[in-house]
Image: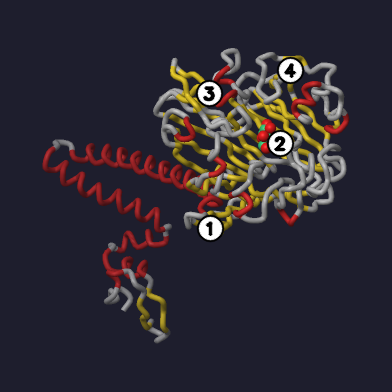
Amino acid sequence: MKNEVPASCGDGRVTRKENSAGEGTEASAESCWKTAELPPALSAVGHLPLKLRHQILWVILIDKVASIVAYSRFENAEQFRVDGLCFLNSIIRRITTMRMLAQHTMIYLGLAVLPFLAGCTSSGPVVKRSYGTMPDGRIAKLYTLTNAHGLKATLTNYGAILVSLEVPDRAGKLADVTLGYDSLEGWLSSTSYFGATVGRYGNRIAKGKFVLDGKTFTLATNDGENHLHGGVKGFDKVFWDAKLVKRGGAAGVRFTRTSPDGEEGYPGKLKAAVTYLLTDNDELRVEFKATTDKPTIVNLVHHSYWNLTGDPNNTILDHELMLAADHLLPVDEGLIPTGELRPVKGTPFDFTQPAKIGARINAEDEQLKRGNGYDHCWVLRNQTGKVALAATLYDPSSGRAMDLLTDQPGIQFYSGNFLDGTVKAKGGVKYQFRTGLCLETQHYPDSPNKPDFPSVVLRPGEIYRHTMILRFSVKK
Ligand code: GLA
């Protein structure tokens, strides 16, 4: 009985068999192989671990082959067999080591990749839903990013706009620290650029004209006699394609669009992208990138309005601001820089140390008069093109603090002087004078007409990049 081979072994399925006592036993694939073929001498091998048995089998098999080859070819077959065995042993040892190595690598890789495969980074999944219908019937989408600490950023592919950003205060209470609208309709007719991606050239260009490689280009003059924020239909008023992205545990959205040659008067077909990432360091990263097929100018800007109290009925005048800048670009009546770099020391524009925004905003100062408050570009101390701290903002009432880092040479600080209570916005609130402020990292206004300013020209083969990092925290 014992040595009899059960019928169904070959295909590896398990069959049920009676033993001499008539009790049913599990006939595993393993036992059938053992009884059928091996001479008694080897049955002891049956107790060895399967792996080892496989190895031995290999040795024997090759040994067999070796002796057959040896006999047919070599004088001293015996010597050849031994050498062969040693050689084979070393091969098997190497194979075993490599397999173990591979196994360990797989385990570590598995441990590293698993969270991503599971699709659940520490920040939650991106929630996508419809936001509203454009006049041409296209559906705008809303993307919500949430990080491990509950910060929530909401974005739409219309204008690649940051619709809201909810941040905790010192008591942990979340509130939206940005200005904007409750629905798409609000943004369609907006002239305030709330949370918008501004371009192709953010800020002003004098008289809507510039010369590039000897050729004059004419842009819309949509801000008095000057050009502002990309013209009549800038990047904030168009549809962007959207793609979900993940990077190092952070979830995000990449918006892309192609601005055709001649759009709003700008030369060259520009491929633009802006990526928003919400990290578990409570950072919102805004990363711009662009390439062109003809020489052109680029200055993409993120235009959020901040109110860290989380309540837009409050002004931002008690916020404490620090700007890492020792110079300012004074402007003319049209808010076009004169070209001078003016030291801020001893002026109401000195924010080298944290200072309350409202403390000097109404001071007798020509530049404050021209801006109707703060609406100027500061020259950042960091001109390296590398990301560094550019500003800090703190609201003592809530404890919310925001550090702003960038690789750009300038920052436009605008204290919300055009808000006049006519804009009906989120929650039905009408935004009053100076209830939001903007900190727009950028190249300087009117740079195309100012040869001394850092260049904003982009040529084919070059990549325009701009990083802005908003890092949130609370002070107890
Ligand atoms: C920028 C400008 C301001 C104003 C706002 C938008 O911040 O500097 O003058 O135009 O945009 O309203």
Q: Which residue is mark 2?
A: 438
Task: Evaluate whether residue 149 shows in this view.
Answer: no
Q: Any atom of ligand 1 within 8 Å of the CB at mark 2?
A: yes
Q: Which residue is mark 3?
A: 209
Q: Secondary structure at mark 1?
A: strand
The label shown at residue 133 is 1
Q: Please indicate whether residue 117 sits to the left or right of residue 121 in the image.
A: left
Query: What's under tag 2, amino acid-wise?
Result: Cys
Look at the picture and state if 268 lies above or below 135.
Answer: above
Q: Position of residue 241 (x, y in %)?
A: 48, 47
Asked if marks 2 and 3 touch (Cβ < 8 Å), the reply is no
Q: Secondary structure at mark 3?
A: strand
Query: Which residue is farthest left?
Result: 72
Q: Nearer the viewer, residue 20 or 306?
A: 306
Task: Evaluate whether residue 73 shows in this view.
Answer: yes
Q: Which residue is mark 4?
A: 327
Q: Nearer the viewer, residue 278 or 275?
A: 275
Query: What's under tag 4, amino acid-wise?
Result: His
Query: What's under tag 3, amino acid-wise?
Result: Lys
Q: Earlier in the sequence, mark 4 or mark 2?
A: 4
Mark toward the viewer: 4 or 1: 1
Q: Label 4 to label 1, Cα distance in Å? A: 45 Å
Q: Label 4 to label 3, Cα distance in Å? A: 26 Å
Residue depicted at x 63% and y 33%: 468
Q: Label 4 to label 2, Cα distance in Å? A: 18 Å
Mark toward the viewer: 3 or 1: 3
Q: Label 2 to label 3, Cα distance in Å? A: 26 Å
Displayed quadrant of residue 66: top left
